[in-house]
Image (spheres, grey):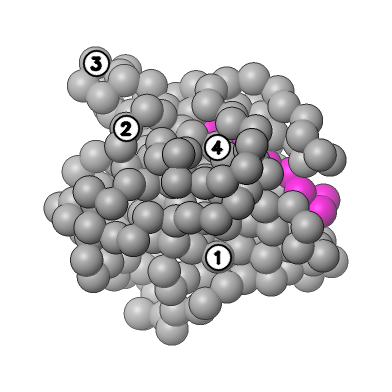
Amino acid sequence: MTISWYGHSCFKITNSGGHLTIITDPFDKSVGLNPPRGSADIITVSHEHYDHNNIKSFSGAPFIVNGPGEYEIKGVSIFGLNSFHDEKQGQERGLNAIYLIEIDEIRICHLGDFGQEKLTDEQLEEIGEVDILMIPVGGTYTISADEAVEIVEQIEPRLIVPMHYKIPGLKINIDGVDKFLKEMGLTQKPAVDKITLKKKDLANKEMEVAVMKP
């Protein structure tokens, strides 16, 4: 399984062999970045905001996952559950879907624009064990860096991939990744172009953070 990052909350996840592609939360050009394009088999949309739902930039007939429920598409298992986009039970920004994506026996949790101060016991139970956690860390519209650390401690994933933070060109005013790394007790890490993993690579793996290049 290989993961690439377009920026913001948009990842490209391909299975072993590269014949199946999942796109998460595609953004449009108004965010200041080049929108992701190409073909996809599956697109997940955490909520209907312009910086997360640009499905029209993809060709073909991808299966769109845009809300809670259980999905089985081409051997990929996806489970979506509701959360809030803010700390006021959705009164400011509405609902947000968390997605659990199981591909090549690896369990990925994409938190979307998660804005709650912490996960509820019910949400934690539904999320379960996580190999890779894609978590927003930029604050303002989502959880802040220190709140993100608390969510990490709740979930205890094997690999943490920060997202939804300030990068060059992004017009949305949010914090950079450095605050999150500092809260995690880490210095600035070299960014990687992609993450390639097999299930066996995660066995007995201690928790670590991977910063990605868009």
* Residue 167 picture quarter: bottom left
Question: What's the CA distance linking mark 2 and mark 4?
Answer: 13 Å
**Circle 1: element type:** strand
**Front residue (pair 142, 19):** 19
* Residue 197 picture quarter: bottom right
Residue 142: horizontal and vertical position, in percent? 30, 40
**Circle 4: element type:** strand
First in sequence: mark 3 vs mark 4: 4
Q: Which residue is mark 4?
A: 44
Q: Which residue is mark 3?
A: 91
Mark 3 or 4, closer to the camera:
4
> On the rendered image, what quadrant is the C terminus found in?
bottom left
Going by the numbered disc 3, the residue's amino acid type is Gln
Q: Which residue is mark 1?
A: 4
What secondary structure prevails in the magenta region? Answer: strand
**Circle 2: element type:** loop
**Front residue (pair 184, 59):** 59
Residue 150: horizontal and vertical position, in percent? 41, 46
Question: What's the CA distance linking mark 4 and mark 1?
Answer: 15 Å
Residue at x 76%, y 63% (from the top left corner):
18
Span highlighted in magenta in the image: 98-106
Residue 3: horizontal and vertical position, in percent? 61, 63
Going by the numbered disc 1, the residue's amino acid type is Ser
**Front residue (pair 131, 198):** 198
Q: Residue furthest bottom?
A: 190
Crowding around mark 1 (Cα neighbors within 10 Å: few <14, some 14 to 19, many 20+) is: some
Q: Which residue is mark 2?
A: 49
Going by the numbered disc 4, the residue's amino acid type is Thr
First in sequence: mark 4 vs mark 1: 1
